[in-house]
């Protein structure tokens, strides 16, 4: 029975790590969803793209692959205060800098939509988050509910004893 108890303890510790990971998914996704939904009513201001470039580099480690990294930055002003932004939209958690770098040129004028309560939070394209943001939120919530219920309402020793037929 001691082996099963240790296995249950290890499962709880692993569950705690996954629970923390699910918390990160939930945290990132919730704010992306809230901002994406509310961005449709944000005011806009004129801005200028300062940087829009893509770097490709090769990685090795068994197989060679090409990785792409986008750099995107724009400047805008709200009520006489200057801000910089790098987020294209709320379609993804990262704001999709690769798509932005392919779509815009340095020096290009853009319309910037900003959060009136937090003008440093801005995008160039407003609208609802994409599928993967919702998937991330759902996955995080599923993990969170599952591990909380098992941790607080489950008996891991009994679960493993039942599985092993003891």
Image: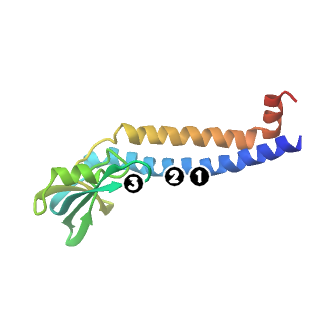
Q: How is the image coloured?
A: rainbow
The x, y position of residue 57, in whole percent, is 29, 57
* 1 and 3 marks in contact (CB < 8 Å): no
Q: In the rendering, at what x and y percent does residue 103 appear?
A: 16, 50
Name the residue nearer the viewer: 34 or 21. Answer: 21
State the residue in front, 97 or 122.
Answer: 97
What residue is rendered at 46% in x and 42% in y? 136
SS for tag 2? Answer: helix
Q: Is residue 128 left or right of residue 137?
A: left
Q: Quadrant of residue 141?
A: top right
Label 3 sits on residue: 60
Name, please, the residue furthest toward the top. Answer: 165
Figure quadrant of the N terminus: top right
Residue at 35% x, 52% y is 94
Q: Which corner quadrant holds the C terminus?
A: top right
Comparing marks 3 and 2, which lies closer to the viewer? Answer: 3
Q: Earlier in the sequence, mark 3 or mark 2?
A: 2
Residue with the most extreme left position = 108
Could you say which quadrant of the image residue 109 lies in? Answer: bottom left
The residues bearing labels 1 and 2 have C-alpha atoms spaced at a distance of 6 Å
Residue identifier under label 2:
24
Give the quarter of the image for residue 82: bottom left
Question: Which residue is disc 1 drawn over?
Answer: 20
Marks 1/2 in contact by CB < 8 Å: the verdict is yes
Q: At which x and y percent is residue 29?
A: 44, 47
- Residue 68 in picture, x, y percent from top left: 29, 52
Q: Nearer the viewer, residue 113 or 92?
A: 92
Find the distance from the CA under tag 3 to the CA under tag 2. 29 Å
Q: Badge 1, how many Cα within 10 Å: few under 14, some, many 20+?
A: some
Q: Residues within 10 Å of mark 3 (few under 14, many from 20)?
A: few
Q: Earlier in the sequence, mark 1 or mark 3?
A: 1
Query: Which SS class for mark 1?
Result: helix
């Amino acid at each position: 029975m001691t082996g099963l108890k240790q296995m249950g303890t290890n499962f709880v510790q692993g569950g705690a790590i996954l629970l923390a990971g699910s918390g990160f998914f939930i945290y990132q996704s919730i704010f992306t969803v809230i901002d994406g939904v509310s961005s449709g009513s944000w005011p806009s201001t004129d801005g200028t793209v300062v940087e829009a470039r893509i770097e490709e580099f090769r990685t090795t480690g068994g197989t060679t692959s090409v990785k792409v990294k986008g750099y995107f930055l724009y400047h805008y002003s709200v009520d006489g205060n200057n801000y910089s932004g790098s987020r294209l939209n709320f379609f993804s958690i990262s704001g999709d800098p690769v798509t932005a770098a392919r779509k815009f040129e340095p020096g290009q004028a853009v319309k910037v939509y900003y959060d009136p309560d937090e003008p440093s939070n801005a995008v160039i394209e407003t609208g609802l988050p994409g599928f993967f943001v919702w998937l991330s939120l759902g996955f995080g919530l599923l993990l969170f509910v599952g591990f909380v219920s098992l941790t607080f309402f489950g008996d891991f020793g009994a679960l493993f004893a039942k599985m092993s037929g003891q």
